[in-house]
Image: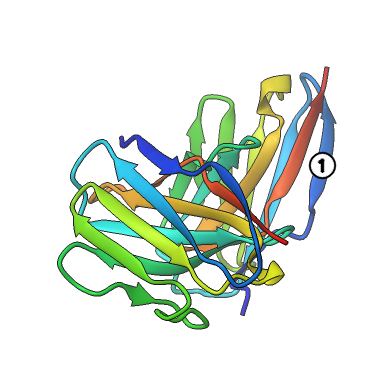
């Protein structure tokens, strides 16, 4: 298994600003994933973050809006840039253990944009 | 394109009775399916999975059934307990999540 810590757990931000979410894993993992859960919606994969390479973004998500860093095998950050109220969501970090297919999630970061 | 759908946003069940949560999918190439449980202010946690080559997988009180011809799977919880009250997500492979079903088990 993996234990994942996210910071902040929640934040309220002003329109036009940015928020950076941190994700720390208690073990080294190759791939880390960032998800968004908008109110009443399913979890949607934003991007896959591999250490030592650029993140791979899913359709509808771009690097300028959601820059991701992955400086080592236990840590990643997701920045949500130029915030608008539509960005109000829960953002979740997750990892997978090779061979299991199972995802382990952080507690999530609840963002409210005013 | 929503490849995994959970058409019931909520479900209420009496304690001790059976809870049945349903999930439909459109992508016949999914190799496996997983169910996650999510409590408020927590991330989802893995509950049970099933390979596409099986039609049933059981783990204690939890059983998942897969009907490939109907592209349908269901999670059965028997007997239901108040601690089972949570949002349940089904997924196709790792990444395609349904919208979730909020289960309330009434004591």
Would residue A106 be seen by someone viewing this image from the given angle? Answer: yes
Q: Position of residue B35 (x, y in %)?
A: 54, 46
Question: What residue is rendered at 50% in x and 34% in y?
Answer: B58
Q: Is residue B86 left or right of residue A75?
A: right
Q: Is residue B6 left or right of residue B49?
A: right
Question: What residue is rendered at 84% in x and 35% in y?
Answer: B12
- Towards the viewer: A11 or B107: A11
Q: How many marks?
A: 1
- Towards the viewer: A103 or A70: A70
Q: Position of residue B31 (x, y in %)?
A: 40, 63
Q: Is residue A12 left or right of residue B51?
A: right
Is residue A15 shown above or below A59? above
Quadrant of the frame with the N terminus of chain A: top left
Q: Position of residue A22 (x, y in %)?
A: 38, 50
Q: Is residue B47 left or right of residue B84?
A: left
Quadrant of the frame with the C terminus of chain A: bottom right
Q: Position of residue A93 (x, y in %)?
A: 42, 52
Question: What residue is rendered at 44% in x and 53% in y?
Answer: A21
- Towards the viewer: A3 or B14: A3
Is residue A13 shown above or below B38? below
Chain where mark 1 sits: B
Determine which quarter of the picture holds residue A78.
Answer: bottom left
Is residue B31 shown above or below A25? below
Which residue carries the number 1 mark?
Answer: B11
Q: Secondary structure at mark 1?
A: strand
Would residue B93 be seen by someone viewing this image from the given angle? Answer: no
């Amino acid at each position: 298994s993996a234990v994942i810590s996210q910071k902040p757990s929640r934040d309220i931000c002003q329109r036009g600003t940015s928020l950076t979410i941190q994700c720390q894993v208690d073990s080294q993992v190759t791939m880390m994933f960032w998800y968004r859960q908008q109110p009443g919606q399913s979890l949607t994969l934003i991007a896959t973050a591999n250490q030592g390479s650029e993140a791979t973004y899913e359709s509808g998500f771009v690097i300028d809006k959601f820059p991701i860093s992955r400086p080592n095998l236990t840590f990643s950050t997701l920045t949500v840039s130029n915030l608008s109220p539509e960005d109000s969501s829960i953002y979740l970090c997750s990892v997978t253990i090779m061979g299991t297919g199972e995802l382990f999630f952080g507690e999530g970061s609840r963002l409210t944009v005013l | 394109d929503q490849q995994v759908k959970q058409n019931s946003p909520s479900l209420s069940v009496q304690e001790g009775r059976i809870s049945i949560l349903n999930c439909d999918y459109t992508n016949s190439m999914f190799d496996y399916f997983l169910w996650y449980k999510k409590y408020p202010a927590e991330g989802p946690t893995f509950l049970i999975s099933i390979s596409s080559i099986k039609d049933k997988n059981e783990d204690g009180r939890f059983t998942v059934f897969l009907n490939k011809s109907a592209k349908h799977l269901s999670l059965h919880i028997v007997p239901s307990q108040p601690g089972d009250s949570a949002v349940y997500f089904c997924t196709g492979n790792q990444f395609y999540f349904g919208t979730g079903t909020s289960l309330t088990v009434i004591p």
